Amino acid sequence: MPTKFNKELWEYGRRVEDMALPIVNKLYQCDFKRNDNDIFDVLDFRDEDKKKIVEVKGRRINSNQYEKTIITSAKVTKAFMEIDNGWEVYFIFVFLDKMFRFQLKEDSEFECKFTGTACIQHYLIPIKDMTEITQDEIKDSVVEDPRPPHQSSESPQSGSWSVDSGLHPC
């Protein structure tokens, strides 16, 4: 049975994507555009001129809570198809404490696991294989805190934040 659409989680994801967009634009020197075909687009942003794609995944945990993080196999499969068509594909993971990037390559391999309430196939990407996005790389990128207002006001990391300030989203 299909799972019910979780609008609150989707809205949270959109806020994380909106927060990450100026950072990935600066990081990759691109002008990424959202794929707005529908709410279930598989990959988030693409720059048609530079043939680069970015998928942003928000995580509501710190980066050291687990050794690996998951991503649905559908996203990885679609990304491999895009690589076959000449695109570069990057996954951006936004944890509570840090942001990481991972470039998917045609020879990338991952452990597989069926997980979640609908028992969906996921790949596990080791966090040690990712590259931390440093403050210096994205200096001067200013973004809005993606947390709902009631959460951001309760946290010392509230309001808008800049990677210069050392605050992280979520």
Image (cartoon, rainbow, N blue to C red):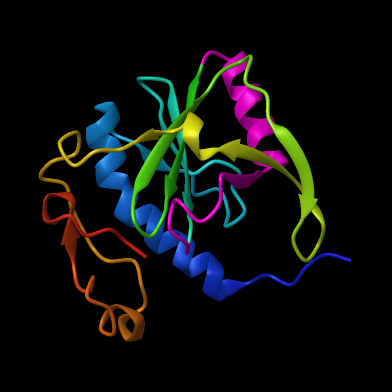
Can residue 110 be seen from the camera position used here? yes
Please tell me which residue is depicted at 38% across the width and 63% down the height of the picture. 15
Which is more toward the observer, 33 or 144? Answer: 144
Of residues 34 and 126, the one drawn nearer to the viewer in this rendering: 126
Image x and y of residue 80, in percent: 64, 24
In which quadrant of the rendered view does residue 119 lie? Answer: bottom right
Q: Nearer the viewer, residue 170 or 166?
A: 166
User: 3 left or right of 64?
Assistant: right
Pinpoint residue 135: horizontal percent, then vertical percent. 18, 42
Q: Would residue 17 appear left or right of 73 to someone viewing this image? A: left
Q: Is residue 83 magenta?
A: yes
The reply to whether residue 90 is in sight is no
Q: Quadrant of the C terminus?
A: bottom left
User: Residue 167 location, x and y as percent?
Assistant: 21, 60
Say how many tags the image has.
0
Q: Is residue 60 above or below residue 27?
A: below
- Which quarter shows the N terminus? bottom right
Most distant residue in the right direction: 1
Residue 38 drawn in magenta: no
Establish if 113 lies above or below 167.
above
Residue 161 occupies quadrant: bottom left
* Range of residues picked out in magenta: 60-86
Residue at left offset 68%, top offset 70%: 5
- Position of residue 41 in the picture relative to residue 129 (left or right): right
Residue 144 at what x, y percent from top left? 23, 63
